[in-house]
Amino acid sequence: MQQHLATFRAIFYPYGLVFGLSLAASGCFTEPKFSDTPQISFKGISRYPLEAGTGVGQQKRDSLIITIGFTDGNGDLGNDLPIASDEKERYTQAGGWGNYRIRAFRLENNQYKELATGENTSLYFPRLSREGKKGAIEGDLELEQVYQYGDTYKIYPTKFRIQIRDRALNISNEIETDTISVPYSIR
């Protein structure tokens, strides 16, 4: 009997220990408390040169990737894509931008000037939590923008100001990126 008890302990003791530790660890987890208004932070900005290909629109270009961190208390970030026209209209009426707002500022004559571009006014990212799920979420978002060199171009130092908003139209804080140099076509 003593030998069977020793064998039982040798086989099941490690599993019992792992099971007990996992129960203890899961009991310690508490869901983070974030505001229902999204909060963002600047994580990084990178530029990746893309070589020219063949064909129309395949000239040399730079891919710019901006990474931001986010938190949201109720997890209502992002939209089903493609976005429905009535949902797009709701965002448009609430300030004229989607759920991702990015404004570019180019350094000209020692002063940053905001660029008026239509490409950054209606940006959306996919839903970040499953349908019907509520609860705190956090993570990173990456936005990629491509800058064409064109036939004539000039490199300008550029920085960006970014905000996001949730489906309830709560607007996050605004962050500013580091400055990075990118090409702009000259006409």
Image (spheres, rainbow, N blue to C red):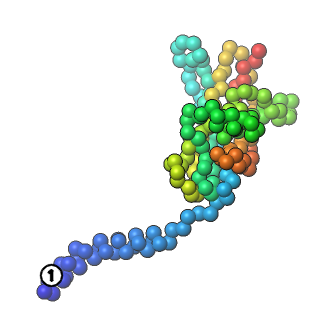
Q: Disc 1 residue type?
A: His
Image quadrant in which you'd find residue 11: bottom left
Nearest the camera: 22 or 92? Answer: 92
Nearest the camera: 142 or 184? Answer: 142
At horizontal 19% and vertical 82% (from top left) the residue drawn is 6
Q: From the viewer's perspective, is 115 left or right of 73?
A: right
Of all residues, the one furthest to the top in this rendering is: 55
Q: Residues within 10 Å of mark 1 (few under 14, many from 20)?
A: few
Image quadrant in which you'd find residue 176: top right
In the image, residue 38 sits, relative to residue 181, either above or below, namely: below
Residue 89: x %, y % from top left: 69, 34
Residue 163: x %, y % from top left: 71, 44
Residue 154: x %, y % from top left: 74, 22
At horizontal 41% and vertical 72% (from top left) the residue drawn is 23
Q: Which residue is mark 1?
A: 4
Residue 42 visible to an observer of this rendering: no
